Image (spheres, rainbow, N blue to C red):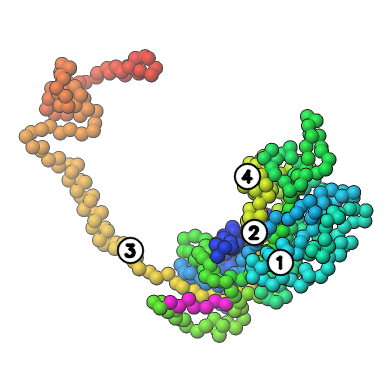
Amino acid sequence: MAPFSTHGGLPPVVSFSWGSDTIYFSETIMSQLLPNGSGFGTFDTETTDPSLNLSPSVNFDNGPEEVFPGSVLRFSKWGIRIRCAKLPDPDVNLVTMSNNGMSYLFTPRAVLASLFSSFDVDYPESSMVPFDITKVVQPGDAISTALNMSDIALGAAFYNNGVGHSFFSRPVSMGADGKGWISIEEVLVRLNTSYTPNGTFARKSNQSIPDAQGNPTWIGYDAAICVELFEPWIVEVYNSTTGLPSTLRIVEPGNVVRSQDTPDIQENLIGLPLSVTYPDVHQQLNSSKLADVYESAHGNSVNQIVKDNGRDAHYVPSPTVVSYTEGEGPLGYMELSAPYFARARGLADASNILPYFSGTGDILARQYQDLVLSSTSINPLLMGIYLGLIFLLGLLAGFFVPRLPLNVPHRGFEVYSWIAAFHADELMEINDMSGIEKNLELHEIEQRVGDVRFRYIDTNMRKESKF
């Protein structure tokens, strides 16, 4: 996987609403639509911007037909859905600090069952097995006596590392069925209350910590559980003639591109299907061979999020942590919100994971070319005649000035015309006896005025100036 610096930045994230969900995608890049192009998922350490063939002037010999700019492309694309819930009963399910300096989260089965049901996804069998607490809790650490092991689906342990937000992930499906990936994601927020004046937490540390002035502060704890789905969606992307490709909309969930016929519009195929002409082109997305890609990209995404951890001091809120709440600003942390965290995590994973699911393979897309309704062009002969007439009229106006009615003298925007307007009675009835009379020709005014000193008063500077 090439580092960010060699790519000059990853594609932006786009999102669309579908029912009650928000679906996150990584924007299509130009290189994906060029012959012999590729996405970021080459997993080649030598990959750089030039190797992504971002220039549209790329020649090709064999392979799928060239995608010409100025058309709508309909194809399947990986997208993310994520839903989260706050950890219930934190006094029982959250251990703030154990004897060994650990924090523990215990996730009830009921919470996971509700999240999976909201996606209309079966509850995973792996979460039905009895929870073995010895695999999570270190020897000598105590947990709440009210914790019922039969109600717990999984547990997670976190070191006392000073990071404001920590994550635990458990894959449910690694894509072996070809339909995508499913994972359970947990977040533990730990912040010093000195930096969260408006913060609300599920629990606080039992012992206070003095700040620089000796005032007592505490570590606030909160947690959330999420179910994240990586699924194929049929989208439409506009391959612009003037800019970068842009995703227009979601057509439908699924993995097969099909006609969207209506009573008024029927789609017709032009030419032979690409599946016949180019049998190597994939008809749909398949995750069965991408488990390693998902694992690497997922770990990369979590690492990118954790890097924004405000490690100037222990448990300091970072901009990322503040985005999990409704607040903003350095001291704007309020209360961990499940919808806000779901949005932040969806955006992060769409930016750090989804680009690497697009590599060098080809996938079938339907192309709908722009319908040209009008066009413009310049007729050189007519344009030359038009410009010549304008030039000729300009010459006539410059050399043959017509006489004005009633022998009115000519006036323009030069200085002598302004002198005539203000020193004669042409604009007002006041005559300042300056020797300039009404209806004088410009050359007569020039002769009478000669070299004249003008005086004006600058009211702002309170002084007189002459020139």
Residues shaded magenta: 256-262
> From the viewer's perspective, is residue 247 above or below residue 199?
below
> From the viewer's perspective, is residue 451 above or below residue 32?
above
Q: Quadrant of the C terminus?
A: top left
> From the viewer's perspective, is residue 385 above or below residue 58?
above
Q: Is residue 258 magenta?
A: yes
State left or right for residue 314 relative to residue 139: left
Residue 414 % position (x, y)? 24, 31
Q: Residue at x 46, y 81 (%)?
A: 269
Specify the farthest residue to the front: 146
Cα–Cα gap, marks 1 and 3: 64 Å
State left or right for residue 364 relative to residue 41: left
The dominant secondary structure in magenta is: loop
Work out whether residue 23 or residue 136 is closer to the camera in this orientation and state it.
Answer: 136
The residue at which mark 3 appears reads as 377
The residue at which mark 1 appears reads as 113
The residue at which mark 4 appears reads as 327
Task: Decide if residue 35 is in sight here.
Answer: no
Cα–Cα gap, marks 2 and 1: 20 Å
Work out whether residue 293 or residue 117 is closer to the camera in this orientation and state it.
Answer: 117
**Residue flagged by tag 2: what amino acid is it?**
Gly
Q: Nearer the viewer, mark 1 or mark 3?
A: 1
